Amino acid sequence: MAKATGASPKQNELYYGDNLDVLRRKIASESVDLCYIDPPFNSKRNYFQIYNNQGGEDRAQAQAFVDTWEWGDEANDGIAWITDIAQLQSGRLTEQTVELLRGLEKVLKRGSLLAYLIHMTLRIVEIRRVLKPTGTFYLHCDPTASHYLKLILDAVFCGQGGDFRNEIIWSYESGGRAKSDFARKHDVIFRYSKSKDFVFNAAAVSSPRGETRHNHMKKHIDEDGRAFRSIKSNGKIYKYYDDEGVIPADVWPISHLQQKDPERLGYPTQKPEIILERIIKASSNEGDVVLDAYCGCGTTVAVAQRLGRRWIGIDITYQSISLILKRLQDKYPAEWPAIEAGILLDGVPRDIASAVALANRKDDKTRKEFEKWSVLTYSNNQARINEKKGADAGIDGTAFFLIDASTNGKAIFQVKSGGATRNTLATLNSDRQREKAEFGFLISMDAPTKAMRDEIVAAGKYKHPLLHREDDRLQVITVAEILRGDRLNLPMARLDAVRSAKAETGSDRQDSLL
């Protein structure tokens, strides 16, 4: 059941799960002041992300997600829900929305693009519901599907008293050069208000006009001593005061994050914080609630935290959840204990039953989530998740440690949700030897049997040359041990697998976008 209407969260909230389910069951109607989303664009690209180059050839083995859509059960269920007369009768959908999707089905047929648009429609409907009457919605997309998305936004928002406010163009100069087309160098950000009464803090995002603007006009001084320039148009006199701010236009020339930018975490769709800063300052006030239903690497969350807003983040992959928590810890090392204590972390396994439920997810989007959660949690987010297909498919993650100042050691992980045997460990040991890894870790739902313990003994021990420390080359970790707090303890473990966010300083927290 969702919270009561208007029940804004009293703390920050980070949800691990499908955003549609979270929006429907856990976010109250009219409880959110501002929502920004940067959803997948249906661009059919594979993304590789967040890891530093520790192991040379392992640089690109971690796959964050695959931005590809296809028609399947989710799309079938979605179109059935949208066209069910009960949704129309209950007021959950507008007639415009239903008829639009019916028309798009006839035009586009049941394929990848329609599946994507159904996915987005279901979530846009819920986002509008959770917005306060004064709330604002920003949807970040690219020209791949922006024209279709605007039709959906118009149907959902304008059909229920809302307004289209802006089509913002984020223009940038980066990437390759086109040879047979005009170079594609922009994204689109749609801005919609839920009603005619909405928050827009012009002063918070305005820049000083300065004496150089409108300098083709004659300068005057009014009775209060303020400098202004004026122009007469259509019988009216317009005054432009030099000390007034100028609201940004709807074209934002802001550079992509560059390779060496200290803000860059390597996440494939990471956006510059300056974009979110402008959006959050313009359309919310301190203490307001900001929602990002596709929070990815947590840029919205990080900026909302810095600007004194409460925030709600949702993501379907545990890599994103772990990255967001690490990002906040890196940015606010001194305040982190208090920040962490103020976060409601929902959907992350807390007991065996919830771990089993995660392991039993069968859909393609979440089939690896149990492996990701167990490896990342046990390794304190210092292992790399491996989704590479092929001969090494049995390896679910890799971590590194230092043998000496210039030599890495390697540990590989395999996760089994049940049915692990001595043969499982024997295979893991073969994989370890093939990968030239010093350690092999098996994460299992079940405790090791005597036969498995014998296999561990047979594999021998690794003695670190500098620490004079010996550890079993094969080890079994149970989910129960992870849940009680046991964590990876490699000799001279490397703690730089994931890129770190720059810590905030006093100067960083000042207004950086005028």
Image (spheres, grey):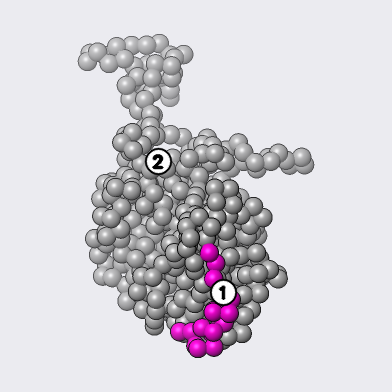
Query: Residue at left 25%, top 50%?
Result: 287
Residue 213: image tag = none
Query: In the displayed structure, would residue 221 be above or below residue 192?
Result: above
Query: Residue at left 46%, top 48%?
Result: 500
**Helix, strand, or loop for circle 2?**
helix
Range of the magenta residues? 447-463
**Helix, strand, or loop for circle 1?**
loop
Q: How many discs appear?
A: 2
**Residue 74, quarter of the rendered image:** bottom right
Q: Position of residue 3 (x, y in %)?
A: 28, 70
**Residue 400, quarter of the rendered image:** bottom right
Query: In the displayed structure, would residue 192 be above or below residue 29?
Result: above
Q: Is 239 or 242 nearer to us in this picture?
A: 242
Q: Position of residue 132 (x, y in %)?
A: 31, 58
**Disc 2 residue type?**
Arg
**Disc 1 residue type?**
Gly
Q: Is residue 488 left or right of residue 43?
A: left
Query: Residue at left 53%, top 41%?
Result: 257
Disc 2 designates what residue?
278
Structural crowding at the residue carrying mark 2, measured as other residues with C-alpha within 10 Å and reported as few (<14), some (14–19) or many (≥20): some
